[in-house]
Amino acid sequence: MNDSTVTLPWLVIRQDDSGNRYRVGRYATRAEAQKIADSLDSRGHKQLYWVERIGQDAENEV
């Protein structure tokens, strides 16, 4: 398997206090993505972080 065939279907999304959304990263497993989201969320900033799977309607807005 080479890098072009690796699937990373899980996204970490950040939304700032102005409502702007950004893709933080893509991950192979939900657990991996959730660990990153939880780590970022624990920093105490106003941003929101969550995990989405590629193909969900909300992801298409990012």
Image (spheres, rainbow, N blue to C red):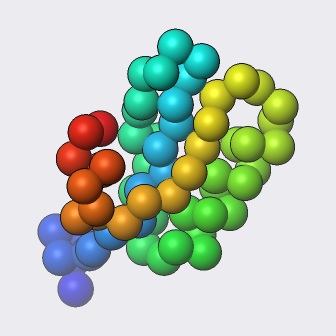
The quarter holding residue 9 reads: bottom left
| Numbered marks: total | 0
User: Residue 12 location, x and y as percent?
Assistant: 49, 51
- Image position of 2 with respect to 11: above or below: below
Left or right placement of residue 4 versus residue 49 in this view: left
Q: Quadrant of the C terminus?
A: top left
Residue occupying the far bottom of the picture: 1
Residue 62 or residue 1, whichever sits in front: 62
The quarter holding residue 49 reads: top right
User: Residue 32 location, x and y as percent?
Assistant: 58, 69
- Image position of 41 with respect to 34: above or below: above
Q: Quadrant of the N terminus?
A: bottom left
Q: Residue at coordinates 31% horizontally, 49% vertically from top-left?
A: 58
User: Residue 44 location, x and y as percent?
Assistant: 83, 31
User: Residue 56 location, x and y as percent?
Assistant: 28, 62
Q: Residue at coordinates 25% horizontally, 39% vertically from top-left?
A: 61
Q: Residue at coordinates 17% horizontally, 76% vertically from top-left?
A: 5
Q: Residue at coordinates 56% horizontally, 23% vertically from top-left?
A: 16
The quarter holding residue 36 reads: bottom right
Residue 11 or residue 55, whichever sits in front: 55
Left or right placement of residue 1 versus residue 44 in this view: left
- Image position of 9 with respect to 58: above or below: below
Residue occupying the far top of the picture: 18
